[in-house]
Amino acid sequence: MTIVSVMKAPEAVDHAALAETMPLDDIDVSNPALYQQDVWHPYFRRLRREAPVHYCRTSPLGPYWSVTKHKDIIALEVDHRRFSSSSALGGITLRDRPADLELPMFIAMDPPKHDVQRKVVQPIVSPENLANFEDLIRSRVRATLDGLPRGETFNWVDKVSVELTCQMLATLFDFPFEDRRKLSHWSDVSTAIPYQGGLVESEEQKEAVFAECLGYFMNLWNERVNAEPRRDLISMLAHGEATRNMSAREYLGNVILLIVGGNDTTRNSMSGGLLFLSQNPDEFAKLRAKPELVDSMAPEIIRYQTPLSYMRRTALEDVEFGGQLIRKGDKVAMWYISGNRDEEAIEEPDRFIIDRARPRQHLSFGFGIHRCVGKNLAEMQLKILWEEILNRLPRIEVVGEPKRVFSAFVHGISELPVRIPA
């Protein structure tokens, strides 16, 4: 399937029919247009049914395997002996970077190096530290919601989702608050596909932005490494036994990882949640009648949105998996976005249900040793946002279609037009 054919206006292609009738070998779920147009569902539905471990021979990203069922994704996630996350082999995305532009980060490492670097930053999201953040997050959410325009259309993504996540990231890094929007920009560039007219048009442009990011964070490193250890991410990295001697490139990689990890999951869940409640007014009514349902709604939003569509592994040897022979060096994508809609693992997976009995049975945070460090913080921010929306905004109207990100990796929303009645 070429990008050209899928990039037609949505009404010009019947994706439900196309997904069922096209040759199975031609299905390419790495096509970013599928996610930008929100037409990915039927392709994964067919793969889960007919080819849960599927080989795509031809794509702009080269050949790759797709693992699409919940149980298979978990099995692959924990098989570190045969499937690697290492940036030296391509890392966590299907798009290979040139070898001289390798970007090491602990999520793109295997044990034991992964484990010791992750342990350095883990204390920032300890239960004790999360409790310290709660009042600060709540006060910022209240100020942000109270400052929203009334009686006019605005972009919820920019004024709420991006703003709140940038504020939190600035706190985690102890980053100059007035420059917090740089964090969102660096996150967007790091996951952007270079193309003409895009956020960046080449790898060279992306590297120039990375250089700017590294320069800024090197100043913060130099300031923190010569001071007493503090409870912020830069100080933790500067003083951590496993990270204090890392190269500048590895430092940049870990900074980018922490920025993206703290930005994309929370930001896109904050946007997706409002969209899903608008599309499901009965669920919104249920929430208003029982505000305590925010506890189960937060993980349901994260499942339904699935802010990162997949993670990649690379086979370290020939492996028989799911009845298929995966060769040494092959790329394998674990499609969380598909596992989260697996009918065999989740009851009525295509429905948004805020009072699910087991709402955390999702794969949006990954599984095993690579599971998202900040998952509890992401949930807490989402819960607090909705608690305060219920207290402060009796009505929010979504007044237009969302604009989605052109990416198969970040499952994101860039614009969501809304209006709060005056």
Image (tube, grey):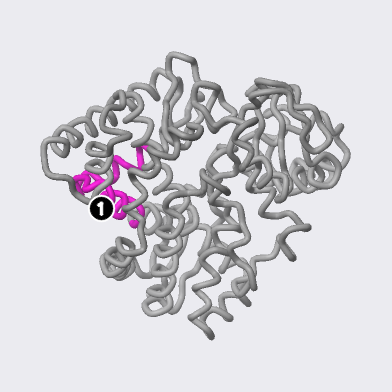
Q: Quadrant of the N terminus?
A: top right
Numbered range of the magenta stretch: 164-186
Say which quarter of the image contains residue 247. top left
Q: Main secondary structure of the magenta part?
A: helix
Residue ID for mark 1: 171
Q: Residue at x 33, y 27 (%)?
A: 209
Residue most extreme to the bottom = 289
Helix, strand or loop status at disc 1: helix
Q: How many labels, in total?
A: 1
Residue depicted at 40% across the width and 18% down the height: 204
Residue 222, image x, y percentages: 15, 32
Where 8 falls versus 337 (above or below)?
above
Q: Amino acid at mark 1?
A: Thr
Q: Quadrant of residue 2?
A: top right
**Measured from the top left, where is residue 349 in percent x and y?**
71, 61
Question: In front here: 244 or 213?
Answer: 244
What residue is drawn where x is 36% and y is 63%?
A: 127
Confirm whether the magenta stretch covers residue 261. no
Q: Residue at x 34, y 24 (%)?
A: 249
Percent x, y of residue 235 = 22, 42
Q: Left or right of 344: which side holds 359?
A: left
Would you place residue 53 above or below residue 60 in this image?
below
Which quadrant: the C terminus?
Answer: bottom left
Image position, residue 137 (x, y; %): 30, 64
Residue extending farthest left: 227
Of residue 126 and residue 297, the one placed in the foreground of this image is 126
Residue 176: within the magenta?
Answer: yes
Drawn side of residue 74 relative to residue 373, left or right: right
